Amino acid sequence: MSDVNEELRTHDRRDQPELLMPEAVLSRTAADLASKYAGVFSPQTVERYVFESYTALRLHAKVHTHLPTLAGRFAADRLTALAQSQGAVPKTVPEVLFICVHNSGRSQMAAALLAHHGLGRVHSRSAGSAPIDAIAPIVIEAMGEFGIDLGSEFPKPLTDDVVAAADVVVSMGCGEACPVYPGKRYLDWTLDDPDGQPIEDVRRIRDDIDSRVRELLGQLVPTTD
């Protein structure tokens, strides 16, 4: 087992009975993803991504029950981004990455709104320079008013692979945390943080993001009307 796996076991033994340790689930996830990415990445690379993704999410998670499943989703998205950045998987639509500090509010709203309005014409991701354990409930409520469900989403740490895959990187108050790659478009949106704000203010922030997202979408995939 790799050093990452050994570190994982060491952390988990502190507060989990041995039968509840997640290595078996993560190993099955890695095997499934290795089949999906056969010919693109080695099984060892896939396994490393799965276990590293679990470790990264566990750093800020308060509840670990569903963490192996979320780690699988996170690893799959990172592997796709890595394959895109290396040219192993073609990009069929523009890729946009939204980054804020906690990935619990602004960047989550922006990614969801772009996906909602884009209708498959663009792909969005989000990440945080210092992610926390969950999306703010008030943000989930405000997005639900738009018919967008963020209940299955979760904060994710910023990784080089998703930055490398992006065509446009939108920063929302995360400072210099975002690595800079040549040939990409970088935007900095000044937006209030919805964390701890009343619903009226969160709606205002949501509507501001929605307006900016619509403008960006028009630039990326202009209509022919």
Image (cartoon, rainbow, N blue to C red):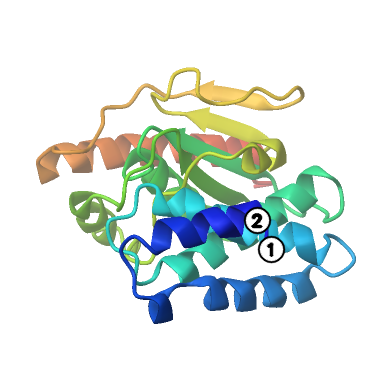
Q: Which residue is mark 1?
A: 47
Q: Residue placed at 83% from the left, 45% from the top?
A: 86
- On the picture, is 131 further left or further right than 118? left
Q: Residue placed at 20% from the left, 55% from the top?
A: 137
**On screen, residue 58 above or below 17:** above
Query: Residue 113, how many percent across, how many down?
Result: 43, 50
- The type of residue carrying mark 2 is Tyr
Q: Residue furthest right?
A: 39
**On screen, residue 166 above or below 81:** above
Q: Nearer the viewer, residue 225 or 77?
A: 77
Q: Nearer the viewer, residue 88 or 201?
A: 88
- On the picture, is 201 further left or further right than 73? left
Query: Residue 82, how many percent across, how many down?
Result: 74, 48
Query: Residue 77, how many percent across, how many down?
Result: 62, 57
- The type of residue carrying mark 1 is Glu
Residue 192 visible to an observer of this rendering: yes
Question: How many marks can you see?
Answer: 2
- On the picture, is 80 further left or further right than 38? left
Rendering quarter of residue 150: bottom left
- At mark 1, the secondary structure is helix
Q: CA distance from mark 1 to mark 2?
A: 5 Å
Mark 1 Cα shell of 10 Å, populated few (<14), some (14-19), many (≥20): many
Q: Residue furthest top?
A: 176
Q: Nearer the viewer, residue 159 or 26?
A: 26
Q: Residue placed at 67% from the left, 64% from the top?
A: 1
Q: Are marks 1 and 2 in contact (CB under 8 Å)?
A: yes
Query: Residue 52, how many percent across, how many down?
Result: 58, 53
Q: Which residue is mark 2?
A: 49
Q: Residue placed at 30% from the left, 58% from the top?
A: 146
